[in-house]
Amino acid sequence: MPFAICLVLLSIYCLFTPTYFYLIDRQTSMGDDGLFLFTGKNITEYYEKGMLFYMTANALFIAGFIWKRYPMHSLRCRIKPEVISRLQNWSLFLYCLFFSIVFIDIAISGINPLDILLGSADESLFGQESITNSYYFRNCADCIITTIVLFAYLKGNKYKVTAMTLLAFILFAIMGFRYRIILTILGLILVYGLDTKTIIPFSRILLTSMALLYFIFFITYNRWNFIQGRFSDLSYNPVEFEYGVFFEQTRASLADFNLIRYYEANPEIHHDYGLTMFGYVLIKALPKFVFPNGVKPYPPPALTVLDHSLELPKQWARTGEATLHYGAFYGAFGGFGFVIMPFLMGFWLRFVVSRNPAFTPLGFLKQVVFSLAIFQFVTRGYFPQFVDHFVYISLPVWLLSGLLKRSTVLSTP
């Protein structure tokens, strides 16, 4: 599953999107019109080089994954029927628990989510830190995703799955986290789509796919209306949607190409040799009081170089631009990062899959949550955030892992 998800993402981010921008003659990573007119450096010369790097990296990634073969198991396991109801109840309990943690953290921070829903709030949740001066509690929103997927996997009532999903989507939307909505949909697709006991008619697959495409474009086009609670301004007409925004939202390859340009134009700037990628995992995990004056050494060096590479006006705030994981590899190790790191990543994915075989319920669920977490790393390229994301999104499965193991038996033919 993680390998398949990566291949789909790499097809979009490393092939379709850069090809689209190459064909329309996109000259800068941030855009050539509107606010970004006459800003940024021309990257036209770096499309070919960047795509060549991508081809090399993708080939090595695949080679790393298939380098070591593990025996395939014909055995299949299942959860004891008499325990499923108990596991469903635990899933619902964890859903309510993590939902309450996020909601309470938002409420005690002085922002009433209900006011945002009613459109009467002057503030939004996007980028707002909690009263605890951290995101530890609010990041439990990732746990909500897993509890929905877990309940669906356990054959929970589909009306309950729908209700849980809608409530979660409302919370995610007003928090400004569109990617969490996408991850929830992806998790449900994996659970229902890979259920070998369910035969889904082609017509239903087609209608569901069309509905999902509409929904993704809907939340993308109306994102800021959701965040600011302007629900009367929502547009439901697909004719009004800006479909080119799909490529704008997947343009991280342009940041990669711009980063290559920046390093070549400024040879005195050194790569950080993995400090941002690996060292900041520890820095991110440690509480603030450990550091002098309670201030962590942010931003990380690689992200500082990325911001400088955009060469936007100094008075502008950070744009939040991100590279792909390939860009992060390049920022850490230069051209060498396009060679050895993709291979090691493929090898790492094969190791994870082999340690968590999908023929067991727990292994299947672990592959699902790892697939959802790897989505963030491939599309945002910040490994410390991936680790943080993976910890939270794995937590519900980890909490129920003991019960799942004890409840698993071999399937009878």
Image (cartoon, rainbow, N blue to C red):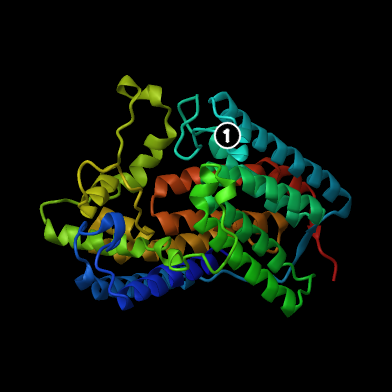
**Side of 124 relative to 59 (left or right):** right
Which residue corresponds to the image point at 65% horizontal and 37% vertical from the top-left? 98
Q: Residue at x 64, y 62 (%)?
A: 357
Of residues 141 and 37, the one drawn nearer to the viewer in this rendering: 37
Seen in the picture, residue 256 relative to 177 is either above or below; the reply is: below
Quadrant assignment for the C terminus? bottom right
- Residue 249's x, y, as percent? 43, 60
| Most foreground residue, 254 or 81 | 254
In the image, is residue 170 above or below residue 109? below
Q: Which residue is mark 1?
A: 120
Q: Is residue 129 left or right of residue 52?
A: right
Categorize mark 1 by other alpha carbons within 10 Å: few (<14), some (14-19), many (20+): few
Residue 371 or residue 81, whichever sits in front: 371
Residue 343 or residue 166, whichever sits in front: 166
Q: Where 405 falls versus 263 (above or below)?
A: above
Where residue 67 sits: x, y (%)?
45, 71
Q: Secondary structure at mark 1?
A: loop
Tell me the residue at 59%/30% (across/down).
112
Residue type, label 1: Ser
Q: Quadrant of residue 154?
A: bottom right
